[in-house]
Amino acid sequence: MKRIGAILAAAVFLAGAIVAQAPPKSAWVPLFNGKDLTGWKNNGEEKWVVEQGTILCESAANKYGYLTTEKTYRDFDLRLKFKGEAAGNSGVFLHSYIIGINPEHGPDIEGMQVEVDPSVGKHTGGLYESGGRGWVKMPTAEGEQALRTGEWNELEVSVQGKHIVTQLNGVKIVDYTDAAPKFTDGVIGLQIHTGGGVKMRWKDILIQEK
């Protein structure tokens, strides 16, 4: 009995040591400081300004525009809020890269996009691969109705290897494991779609790396 007790005690001690040595979970870090665009790069000729603690993106040159992080990211959880103030398509890019500039339509980007649109039923939260396969995962029927028109919406994106999960206002939109990802790391970016009319606000952009 004493021997068994000693073994159990040793096992408990070892388990505690393993837990103690496990790296702490990283903290949530703001990607946007609410004051200026420090840490971000404006790609293209479209309008990106800080206004009342938010990032306002607005069509100016009728081309594609991207505001991308200066840093690249691999595995992470991302939270942000957005509000559409006019018709026009936008998006959140992850594991992406700007690969060039086209004089007609602006910057070219390749990588995965989480769709963001100001209208219900336009696939917000779905996954679209730019420079590749196009749509790879559409929202669920419930997910198509999760958008709050003209209000602040909370988007959450979880990326772990090839696994991507998106949630909109607490509703799971897609749960997707990518068999053939174009990239496994890259910048995070906000988009102005070509075609004009885009006016979107963003705030409370936080990331937690894994």
Image: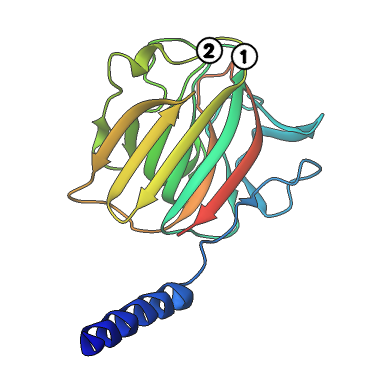
Task: Tell me the crowding category of disc 2: few under 14, some 14 to 19, or many 20 or more residues within 10 angstroms, Cα based.
Answer: some
- Describe the element under mark 2 as helix, strand or loop: loop
User: Residue 153 location, x and y as percent?
Assistant: 56, 22
Q: Which residue lies furthest to the front in this view?
A: 1
Q: What element carries label 1?
A: loop
Q: Which amino acid does label 1 sit on?
A: Glu
Q: Residue 200: percent from the left, percent from the top?
A: 62, 23
Residue at 38% from the left image edge and 11% from the top image edge? 121
Residue closest to the eye, 171 or 120: 171
Q: Mark 2 points at which residue?
A: 148
Residue tagged 1: 151
Residues tagged 2 and 1 counted as in contact (Cβ below 8 A): yes
Residue at image coords 28%, 48%? 163
Outermost residue to the left: 179
Indicate the quadrant containing the N terminus: top left, top right, bottom left or bottom right. bottom left
Compare residues 129 and 142 and report the one nearer the observer.
142
* Image coloring type: rainbow
> Which residue is depicted at the point 29% across and 87% down?
6
* Left or right side of 141 for 124: right
Q: In which quarter of the image is residue 115?
A: top left
| 87 to the left or right of 202 | left
